[in-house]
Image (spheres, rainbow, N blue to C red):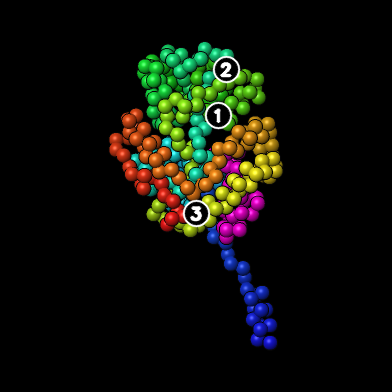
Amino acid sequence: MKKLIAAIALLAAAPAWAEDKMTVLLDWFVNPDHGPIIVAQENGYFADEGLEVEIVPPADPSAPPRLVAAGQADLAVSYQPQLHLQIHEGLPLKRVGTLVATPLNCLLVLEDGPIKSLADLRGKKIGFSVAGVEEAILTTLLSQHDIGLDEIELINVNFSLSPSLMTNQVDAVIGAFRNFELNQMDIEGVAGRCFYIEEEGIPSYDELIYVANPDTLDADMIARFLAATEKATQYIVNNPEKSWEIFAATSPELQDELNARAWVDTLPRFALRPAGFDAGRYARFEQFLKDSGMIDSLNPVSDIAIDVTAQ
């Protein structure tokens, strides 16, 4: 009996198992797009999976994938279209999970402006923030109306997408997120209208994904991370108002009308199965980029995305 008591006392005094630490780099400052990550943290779902997760907003939005490729973080939130190009550039990256499973990008115009259809873009000014994939998207949108890129004026408006449209500096902008810019304009009293690119000939894709370095990733740890965010997504879907309160309580900067509206509009777009993926979706977008002249060859899906739960 004494031995049993001593053994129990020894177990009670033993330190708890340390949680696995992982660093996740966001694509931008915390916003409703990151809802499942923040709710998983606040509700203790990461801790339930034995994880201690450090969530880091980037100083430079273009840096996270490159930092992960360099082994300076475990995961980065990034974008499927950019991932295809980054892999062709030689970066060691793969998609290991999905955060937002539908396109958010749209071509945004003024509701009462001169652009009633894409055919009206000939001779007009289109604002953009980042060159690259946006040009391939525009080429496809315009070509359906026999308009070439040389028949429009592309203007780099940096990150002032909706402001440049509202002040008539441009006639349309590409790269606007439908869950944010539309709400931002409406709050400012200026009605906008989106042309949804997946309805205009662009293959559908995962807007926000998790990327990791395939040479150094810990598949088990990432699978546990995705299990926690899946649980958080289920909680958000089942408790939209309560989950918003939990999310917004993490920062005063989130407690405004724009973020509240964006939360509602983003909720149905979260990936219900973050670890699962549609291989055909990645193959089709790779082919789209090649057809658009953005890449010279095709990578197999196995070079672009993996299912960490099957590793």
Q: Where is residue 236 in the image (x, y as percent from the top left)?
A: 63, 44
Q: Residue furthest bottom?
A: 2
Q: Position of residue 50 (x, y in %)?
A: 57, 60
Going from N to C along the chain, the mark reached first, 2 or 1, is 2
Q: Where is residue 143 in the image (x, y as percent from the top left)?
A: 37, 20
Observer-nearest of 39 and 25: 39
Q: Which mark is residue 202?
A: none
What's the magenta region? 25-54
Would you name the residue on which mark 1 appears? 178
- Residue 26, magenta (yes or no): yes
* Disc 1 crowd, CA 10 A, few/some/many (<14, 14-19, 20+): many
Observer-nearest of 61 and 46: 46
Mark 2 → mark 1, Cα distance in angstroms: 14 Å
Would you name the residue on which mark 2 appears? 111
Q: Position of residue 102 (x, y in %)?
A: 50, 36
Q: In the rendered view, tell whether residue 177 sits above or below residue 250.
A: above
Instruction: Say what secondary structure mark 3 lies in.
Output: helix
Amino acid type, mark 2: Glu
Q: Residue furthest left?
A: 297
Q: In the rendered view, tell whether residue 285 sits above or below residue 46.
A: above
Is residue 311 among the parts visible in the rendering?
A: yes
Would you name the residue on which mark 3 appears? 222
Observer-nearest of 122 and 15: 122
Observer-nearest of 253 and 104: 104
Going from N to C along the chain, the mark reached first, 3 or 1, is 1
Instruction: Say what secondary structure mark 1 lies in.
Output: loop
Amino acid type, mark 1: Arg
Amino acid type, mark 3: Ile
Q: Is residue 123 left or right of residue 184?
A: left
Residue at 60% in and 38% down: 267
